[in-house]
């Protein structure tokens, strides 16, 4: 009689590898595709204001037939598209996942770098060198890949690299974004993904060909643009895309045409990669832009914003219709969320009621260095700064055998006297637990990347850089809540104003997919 004992380990491994996908028999069927719609700088009130101007198959469909949570707390002190995306997909704050902001000061390079900067990986169709390895926690996509032994597919597409790369996690098949210089869809050699069909899209000069004749101007009759409360008579606008693209594609990304191109790429990817076509659920995340600052004119800006939302509404309607045709909305789970607050332009007119004064990071660090020099002698005591963090020269402080905590405390007390600074927290207090993990400072702190002195500026202050004027913005603390909704795959329509957190998305998706939540997840499943 032959022995079959040698096949038992194999059977056991097969059983374990499919266990994560083995839903209970009385449960709902798992979705074939999870589609994440991430709206960068979404202003939730616009969806309500513009509701009557939307069609029936985009935002209106999702908001009326989805499971809507309209009070999703961002939790973080300075939310942006990078740290919010990391928190959404890992289910935890920066103190665990490490993405404190879109950019931070790098002590070794002594300059600000992107949160996805990685010199060890080259770019595909870009000169940028990026990877997701700065992300220190796994994500929903990572757990999905692990549960299915890599048979589930995970893609993240966006206009900016930070959002696309961070949301995709470390195990994504690919993250794709639009290059600022060429307008090509690009990626990193980290993923080893640049198929022929994607190269053909780039090589045919998709954007260059369109920009020669296209422009961004109102798509609908002027009578439709009446949904911005208190707006003046709308000012007509007409931006030639060829003019925008002459200086690169940074401005192009602020037009609704960039969202349309992203939509087209997503549908092409779904077809080419056959997403949602087998029993192993796939994950696709799309990062759209919902803010434009091309106009400095208030009446024209209100006009542009409505046109951007109306066009995005049409794109989403088209996307949902095509997914229903190719996969089926009953087999697709769609979630929609805002990622980061709208960037506010600085207030230039000092006589305007909205002007609350300026704050200059570089001048502040120079002033602090002079103060410390007066006490401890002439040295380079301050190594660098970001918007709201100051990095001391720890190496020199140690070499001189000085008391680091004493220097931090004196520097903090001095900085509280600087105009525009409301509060200063020495970072070592967070390391010692003096400020609980529940504080916004604590949640946003990661010791290898955060500064030595953490600042809270007065609300309404303009942050002004001498070296990086394109980073100028106005501090705005109100409205750090967003929208989170789920639609499709048997989800019943409902609306809730209960307070939920960005950390709740990851455990909710994990429960639906019958996978483990990310290992550092602190959120709770919403249903």
Image (spheres, rainbow, N blue to C red):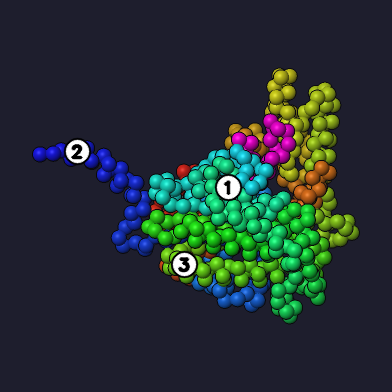
| Labels 1 and 3: the sequence-earlier one | 1
The span picked out in magenta is 97-120
Mark 2 vs mark 3, foreground winner is 3
As drawn, is 217 to the left or to the right of 506?
A: right
Q: CA distance from mark 1 to mark 3?
A: 28 Å
- Kindly identify which numbered label has been placed on residue 326: 3
Position of residue 286 relative to residue 312, above or below, is above
Residues packed near mark 1 inside 10 Å, few (<14), some (14 to 19) or many (20 plus): many
Instruction: Work out which quarter of the rendered image holds the N terminus and state it.
Output: top left
Main structural element of the magenta stretch: helix, strand or loop? loop
Q: Residue furthest right?
A: 351
Q: Residue at x 70, y 64 (%)?
A: 210
- Kindly identify which numbered label has been placed on residue 5: 2
The residue identified by callout 1 is 166
Residue 36: tell me if it is visible.
no
Instruction: Work out which quarter of the rendered image holds the C terminus and state it.
Output: bottom left
Marks 3 and 2: in contact by CB < 8 Å? no
Q: Residue at x 19, y 38 (%)?
A: 5
The quarter of the displayed image where residue 483 is located: bottom right
Is residue 340 magenta-colored?
A: no
Give the image location of residue 296, x and y in percent.
82, 62
């Amino acid at each position: 009689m032959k022995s079959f004992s040698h096949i038992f380990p194999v059977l056991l491994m097969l059983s374990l590898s499919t266990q994560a996908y083995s839903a209970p028999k009385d449960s709902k069927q798992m979705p074939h595709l999870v589609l994440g719609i991430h709206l960068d700088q979404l202003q939730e009130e616009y969806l309500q204001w513009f509701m009557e101007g939307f069609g029936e198959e985009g935002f209106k469909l999702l908001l009326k037939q989805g499971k809507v949570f309209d009070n999703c707390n961002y939790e973080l002190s300075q939310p942006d598209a990078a740290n919010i995306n990391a928190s959404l997909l890992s289910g935890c704050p920066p103190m665990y996942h490490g993405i404190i902001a879109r950019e931070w000061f790098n002590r070794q390079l002594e300059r600000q770098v992107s949160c996805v900067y990685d010199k060890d990986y080259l770019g595909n169709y870009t000169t940028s060198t990026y990877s997701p390895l700065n992300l220190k926690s796994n994500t929903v996509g990572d757990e999905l890949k692990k549960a299915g032994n890599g048979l589930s597919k995970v893609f993240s597409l966006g206009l900016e690299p930070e959002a696309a790369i961070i949301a995709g996690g470390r195990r994504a098949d690919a993250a794709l974004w639009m290059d600022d210089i060429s307008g090509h869809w690009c990626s990193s050699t980290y993923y080893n993904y640049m198929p022929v069909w994607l190269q053909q899209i780039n090589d045919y000069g998709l954007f260059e060909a369109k920009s020669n004749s296209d422009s961004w101007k109102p798509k609908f009759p002027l009578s439709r643009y009446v949904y911005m409360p208190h707006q003046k008579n709308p000012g007509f606008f007409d931006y030639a895309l060829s003019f925008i693209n002459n200086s690169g594609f940074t401005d192009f990304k602020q037009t609704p045409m960039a969202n349309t191109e992203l939509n087209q790429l997503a549908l092409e990817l779904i077809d080419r990669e056959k997403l949602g076509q087998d029993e192993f659920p796939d994950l696709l995340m799309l990062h759209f832009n919902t803010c434009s600052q091309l106009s400095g004119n208030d009446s024209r800006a209100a006009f542009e914003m409505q046109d951007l939302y109306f066009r995005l509404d049409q794109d989403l309607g088209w996307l949902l219709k095509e997914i229903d045709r190719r996969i089926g909305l009953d087999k697709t789970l769609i979630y929609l969320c805002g990622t980061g607050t709208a960037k506010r332009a600085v207030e230039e007119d000092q006589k305007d009621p909205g002007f609350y004064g300026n704050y200059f990071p570089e001048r502040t660090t120079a002033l602090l260095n002079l103060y410390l020099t007066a006490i401890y002698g002439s040295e380079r005591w301050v190594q660098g700064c970001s918007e709201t963090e100051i990095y001391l020269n720890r190496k020199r402080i140690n070499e001189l055998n000085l008391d680091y905590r004493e220097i931090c405390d004196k520097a903090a007390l001095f900085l509280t006297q600087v105009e525009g600074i409301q509060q200063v927290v020495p970072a070592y207090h967070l390391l010692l637990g003096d400020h609980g993990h529940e504080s916004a400072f604590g949640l946003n702190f990661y010791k290898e990347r955060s500064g030595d002195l953490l600042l809270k500026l007065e609300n309404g202050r303009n942050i002004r850089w001498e070296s990086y004027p394109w980073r100028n913005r106005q501090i705005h603390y109100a409205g750090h809540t967003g929208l989170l909704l789920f639609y499709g795959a048997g989800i019943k329509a409902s609306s809730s104003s209960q307070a939920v957190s960005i950390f709740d998305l990851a455990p909710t998706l994990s429960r639906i997919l019958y996978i483990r939540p990310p290992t550092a997840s602190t959120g709770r499943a919403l249903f």
